[in-house]
Amino acid sequence: MIPLTIKENIILTGFMGTGKTTVGRLLAGLLNYSFVDTDDLIEARYGRSIAQIFAESGEAAFRQMERDIAQGLAEQEGLVIATGGRLMLDPTNVKALGQNGRVFCLVATPEEIVARLARDNSRERPLLSAPDPGQRILELLQKRNHKYQQFTQVTTDGQKAIDIAHYLAELLQVIQNDETPATKNI
Ligand code: S3P
């Protein structure tokens, strides 16, 4: 893998369970970038789990924390950033992170998302603590899908995380080659 010379951040967005954290960590390894996950940063900075923040301070407070974290990350470079599922649906965050970052949206079918989230107990997801989480996922997807579509879509169904990471790394090479002006041999 030829190292990327552009050091803008790579931002992964997409619904919960689309693989942002797993793919992001692998991609950072391939590119020799640092990996960060915005939910982890929030938990570390505020010393509470996401579920506690939602329960004790409410969703609006959590969304403000996301904005503060996004602002800080926008000032750095050479990062792969896995964002919480709604972070990049906030135009303030798109403006901040978009200045110095390239955004990819990981996509999966609702069935795949439901199955993956049922297997994933790494973190509690307060928005899904409903009597019927499957139904809640469908409702949220319906509300959000058109907003995710503003970003380059990367389908993840039936794919291994490492293959998606390789695909993105290669895509970034192609983008870099297209954007780097050719030097002329005189
Ligand atoms: C959320 C997604 C979660 C986390 C929070 C809210 C959302 O992150 O930020 O529970 O609104 O989609 P993941 O997408 O990493 O699960």
Image (tube, rainbow, N blue to C red):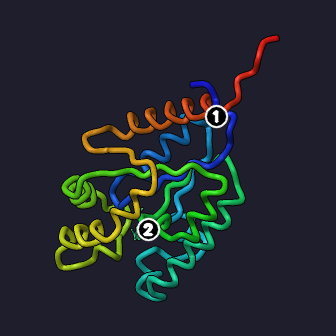
- Mark 1 secondary-structure assignment: helix
What's the amino acid at mark 2?
Answer: Arg
Residue under the point 64% across and 34% down: 179
Q: Counting other residues with Cα less than 10 Å from the Cα at mark 2, is it few (<14), some (14-19), or many (20 or more)? A: some
Question: What percent of the width, then of the height, locates residue 19?
Answer: 37, 51
Residue placed under numbered mark 2 in the picture: 86
Quadrant in the rendering for residue 148:
bottom left
Question: What percent of the width, then of the height, locates residue 16?
Answer: 35, 61
Quadrant in the rendering for residue 17:
bottom left
Q: Give whichever of 182, 129 is nearer the camera.
A: 182
Ligand 1 quadrant in view: bottom left
Q: Is residue 103 above or below residue 114?
A: above
Question: What percent of the width, then of the height, locates residue 183?
Answer: 75, 21
Residue under the point 44% across and 48% down: 152
What's the amino acid at mark 1?
Answer: Glu
Question: What percent of the width, then of the height, locates residue 103?
Answer: 52, 51
Residue placed under numbered mark 1 in the picture: 179
Q: Give whichever of 47, 141 is nearer the camera.
A: 141
